[in-house]
Image (cartoon, helix red, strand yellow):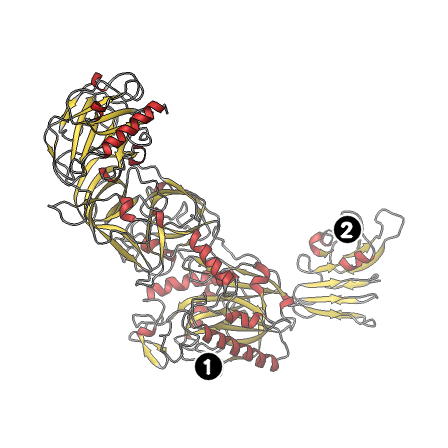
Amino acid sequence: MHKQASAIAAAVAALLASTPASAGVVISQIYGGNGNAFASDYVELFNNGSTAVDLSGWSVQYASATGTGNFAGNSVTPLAGTLQPGHWYLVQLRTSSGTALPTPDATGNADLSGSNGKVALLDTATGLACNGGSTACSAEQQAHFVDLVGYGSANFYKGSGAAPAASSSSALLRKAGGCTDSGNNASDFVTGTPAPRNSATAAVPCSGGGDDGGTVALRRTYEIQGSGQQSPLLGQTVMTSGVVTQLTNNGFFLQDAAGDGDAATSDGLFVFTSSAPSVTAGQLVQLTGKVAEFAAGSGSVTQLTGPSAISVLGSGSITPVALALPVSGGLERYEGMLVTLAGPLTVDQNYYQARYGQLTLSAGGRLETPTNRYRPGAQAQALAADNAARRIVLDDGSSAQNVNPTPYTGPNGALRGGDLIGSITGVVDYGLSTSTTGASAPSDYRILPLDKSTLRYTTANPRTATPPAVAGNVKVASFNVLNYFTTFTNGATAGGQTGQGCSQGGTVSASNCRGANSLAEFQRQRAKIVEALAALDADVVGLMEIQNNGAVAVQNLVDALNLRVGSGTYAVVPEPAAGSGSDAIKVAMIYKPARVARVGAPASDTAAVNSRPPLAQTFAPANGERFTVVVNHLKSKGSCPAAGDADAPGNVDSGDGQGCWNALRVAQADQLRRFVAQLQAASTSNDVLLVGDFNAYAQEDPVFQFTGSGYVDEVARFNGFGYSYVFDGAAGRLDHALSTGTLSPKVAGVVHWHVNADESVAHDYNLEYKQPACASCAPDPYAATPYRSSDHDPVLVGLNLVKTITASPTSTSVTGTAGDDVIVSGAGRRTLTGGGGSDSFVFSTGFAGGATITDFTPGDDRISLAALLQSLRVPSTDPIGQGYLFCSSSGADALLSVDPDAAGPAAARAMVLVKNLSCAALLKPANFLF
């Protein structure tokens, strides 16, 4: 900047600063883009003082930013009338075509630059023969300046620098609606959407917040929001303005056109209208309302209530702020603002998708329940904080429930947890994140998309028709079937009775029933569970949340399952002699008699600590290898005790992530360990598998009671992070498979089949909140499929229960069992018969020297040569293709030989004769273990 211009600017600033406070008229807005946002250029004046000002004899004058033309050389616009405190005065200048201004208070012809220039407010109507740059203004001329605004590249301005450059679509706006006047153009002005106001606009005085002759204080949206969690203007009635960015069914979001540039304050605000708002997105509006904090669970959201005097000043647009989670400093500073949230975002929870139009999303991958990965403590708390920082709720922006159509269903109508959504442009809001209400209810920041149709989905976690395969020859499953009751809440039963009830603690009432409300719902529920069980195809299934009515409910399920998979496929493990407790629900067990046999009687533990006694049964496959399954359902985390209750110590929520009733679950786990010890003492096998809903995540105290005392967490062993349940957007596993140390080497695989936890409840069996029961609700997406057959994912465990039979040196024959065997031949001539099942014939050292296999079944049985070939130092991983192993026909039989050096000089030697099998059928890699 030239020193001369700097000196003149300083002199003018000093002169203007000495103007009496009663003459508080300032230039509040300048727009020079005629023919664009508005047809006319304009200058807006504002009385930010406390007394009326007579404008008679005053004028508005203009000069170019750096040219040689003087103020007098352009059209001088004279003013007239009296400007009251808190009122505006609109001066219309050069006009072309387009949207007309509000009725001007004065009219002139000056042609303003849209980006750079100098506008002076003078107390004289005589044009000044100076421009403050090439022609300095004398002291006499300076005495006539009431206000001066130099903008863009102007060389004459008030204060330390010029105001920012405007454009054909933006205006210069004095901050705080004209109230800010520090004497510095550079800091007093911002650019924003043109919003001209005339003397007819409702008054907004700059001082005081109460009633002053029917006027209220003007406050920008960022002043209302403030920099804290609550508004500093709480309870005050204010006037504000801004661009409407988003509509809801009971209000709209308003954002200041320019903002204050302060990262600590939000420029946006929600206006609560209680019904459909009359404004439209993109309008620049002004209104009056009362500042309030709307309680949203554990937090609140700043809003204006009782809006009145809503006037449309024009139109405008807001550029979304680009954000990526986690946001430094949190989202409070963006509450009410238009943003673009970077994707991809992972769907963590869709439980409230159909009911409330909400999805819980996160950046950086799926949210995990902290105590699923870490022991309660600092690491778990750190993960909880990380979850909160990465999480946001995608909300449909409506307070209506069960809207039609259901939002965010994705391209195939079944958006699942783990799927992805791309970047989202919308308004940041704050509200409840669950159906829980009250001061302690969880709440979250939300984003309300401007246009749901622009969302882009990626199916990253597709449905699967069957569970992932597990190895082994026996499969055990665990499945919480979410209240399978054959007595319904309407008092009817699956058998056609009416006026019935469910037993709970010795009382019988329909109010104790927890499952389907009617036969129609029950049939839908059963169909889904049957499809899930059929796909699991397990040999033993532990069930939780079966109605505790003897064998009625579980037998009903087995009957339906057998209709689906074949008569007699499954049977019910009988009720144990000690019973199943007095709770309305119990655990149960079903099994395939053709695959495993029950050994001994079932057992339960009815110790007082167990409200739902565990159920144990020992089984044996055809080879006689025994194992015991214990089905469990520990105390839930809900229905917390009051602080003064007798059972409160250790059971109230301590805040460490384990929820309520932790001490009781620990006591139940300790009792379960004692029960297992009793089972082992009474059995010939120590191989025990604990399955069920432990209502404790993987690193919580009840599970640690087992893993800290020799039990193996088989889910963790095979999957690391596993989940079977989603709560408050975080995934974890309540459903476990814990084995004794002797059984663990025989566990061949464990999976959770994610058919429930990732599914929207819209797909469940319930009829309420769906058409046709609810005419205004969305259509019913129900199908008789496994998906959302429950709220827990089933667990599938593969056991490798084979019997090892080793031939003695003197034996001439070895015969296996009817099940799966490993027959170790050793050296010597002998006959080997596998029997039933899938058998492995092992030749480990030397040669069989004429061994014969009598009943080899290709594709089912296998010949194991790994140890033998290693002892012969055969280098190939393809012994058949490389010529180390070959076959010759001997009548109807196949003679298998080994050649230690393939094409070398060493002679091949016959190893084993396989009866009644051709070489073509035998010599395939699938029939061997190398």
Residue matched to label 1: 579
Please name whichever residue, 557 or 739, is drawn nearer the observer in this view of the structure. 739
The quadrant of the image that shows the N terminus is top left
Residue 710 placement, left or right of 888: left
Tag 2: residue type? Pro
Q: Is residue 466 visible?
A: yes
Q: What is the x, y in percent for residue 611?
A: 43, 78
Q: Farthest residue in the right direction?
A: 905
Residue at 37 percent across and 74 percent down: it is 641
The image shows residue 414 at horizontal and vertical percentages of 41, 50
- Circle 2 residue: 879
Drawn side of residue 247 relative to residue 588, left or right: left
| Mark nearer the N terminus (1 vs 2) | 1
Q: Residues within 10 Å of mark 1 (few under 14, many from 20)?
A: some
* Residue 416 appears in view: no
Name of the residue lying farthest toward the front: 139
